[in-house]
Amino acid sequence: MLRKRLLIPLILSLVTFGLVVACNSGTPTGQTNPSPAENAATAAIPIGAALAQTSNLALLGQEQVIGVKMAETYFNKKGGVNGTPIKVIIQDVAGDEPGAINAINTLITQDKVVGILGPSLSQQAFAASPIADRAKVPILGPSNTAKGIPQIGEYVGRVSAPVAVVAPNAVKTALKIDPKIKKVAVFFAQNDAFSKSETETFQETLKSLNLDIVTVQKFQTTDTDFQNQATAAINIKPDLVVISGLVADGGNLVKQLRQLGYQGLIIGGNGLNTSNIFPVCQAQCDGILIAQAYNPELDNPINRDFVAAYTAENKKAPPQFTAQAFTGIQVFVEALKRVDDKNKLSTLSLEQIRQQLNQEILAGKYVTVLGDIAFTPEGEIIQDKFSVAQIQMDADGKNGKFTFVKN
């Protein structure tokens, strides 16, 4: 009996010891769990994407999400980063600055990404990109075209050409279509940093071409009723209307201008540069001119692959926002390859990867769907291929396409 009482505790002790060993067998004594950098090198390398998936900005962000997912699939099929796959982690920035700040903080501190593509708006970038810069995490704006974005900090760049370079092309094209244009009505969203920056460029261009700005009308990106502003402008009988806003507000403004009788040319800014505007202004979208930083007709191998993949899935040509998001991920992948060529990622801390990645991004040259690009030491994109497209709606007004204007 005594022997039995002694034997039971011994058996329980052995079982407990075996369970402890089993539970800890994945992490031997004296070792810690893998660092984020080691995980990035041996599993999938995490690249962040801070993009709008909700709010009135979702119409733009949807196209960017498609671009980063396409890039993840495309570059992983080509071997990722020297054999290591990438994983794009998407966080929603919604439509305001707090949303962008939360998304970027999460990507940096929780998701431990090596770099970030985003946020969707310039307004958000001015608020949130400084967080990435202070944390020394490279961040590339996919659609941040306002003046001053690369100047935010050493770790801030963009793959979206500045509005000052792109927007004037649309005005020059309008004058080729109608050389008699003289009086211009300007509209812009006063609560959006990009729209305010873009309208400054448009207005400077108009003045340089000796065109008369007969009225400047302001609105909010959340507005849906533009009857007062539209009526005030139409009463002055402008030959051209120039709009800087986002998809929902800009599309509704176009629709109401046409319904109130305006029949002249309309130039839309970069915020209207998406097929998601078609269901907003429908038949009234027809004829809008929009300058482009991407042309699906560009003939290089990666763009042919990109257009074929997008068209097979969506039955239409890819838009600019999708192309720019795809390009941003490409830049990260190619720069990470160069980091790994020099110093294996598995030997570097996360902080070292981020620092060296930023250096390689700025030093590299890239053959992309946007054409050949590079960066200035400040993080500004160097790009020389631009176009202008005119929206052509179908007869039923439900679908349309961007038709590129031959200059």
Image: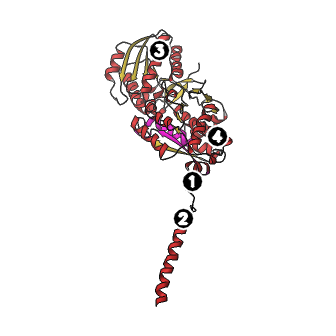
Q: Upstream in the sequence, badge 1 or badge 3?
A: 1
Residue 121 rendering spot, x and y as whole percentages: 45, 32
State the extent of the magenta-drawn residues as a range.
42-70
Mark whose residue sits in front, 3 or 2: 2
**Three-letter code for the amino acid on which mark 4 is drawn:** Val
Mark whose residue sits in front, 2 or 4: 2
Q: Upstream in the sequence, badge 3 or badge 2?
A: 2
Residue 34: mark in rendering: 1
Give the class, few, some or many, for how many residues have Cα within 10 Å of label 2's Cα (few <14, many ≥20). few
Q: Upstream in the sequence, badge 1 or badge 4?
A: 1
Is residue 348 found left or right of 397 in the rendered image? right
Q: Secondary structure at mark 2?
A: helix
| Relative to 152, residue 114 above or below | below
**Three-letter code for the amino acid on which mark 3 is drawn:** Glu
Q: Secondary structure at mark 4?
A: helix
The residue lying furthest to the right in this view is 341
Mark whose residue sits in front, 3 or 4: 4
Give the class, few, some or many, for how many residues have Cα within 10 Å of label 3's Cα (few <14, many ≥20). some
Residue holding disc 3? 204
Residue 391 rendering spot, x and y as whole percentages: 49, 26
Residue holding disc 4? 339
Q: Secondary structure at mark 3?
A: helix
Gap between marks 2 and 4 measured at Cα: 34 Å
Gap between marks 3 and 2 measured at Cα: 67 Å
Q: Is residue 312 visible?
A: no
Asked where in the image residue 187 lies, by quadrant, the reply is top left
Mark whose residue sits in front, 1 or 3: 1
Is residue 367 found left or right of 178 in the rendered image? right
Residue holding disc 2? 24
Q: Upstream in the sequence, badge 1 or badge 2?
A: 2
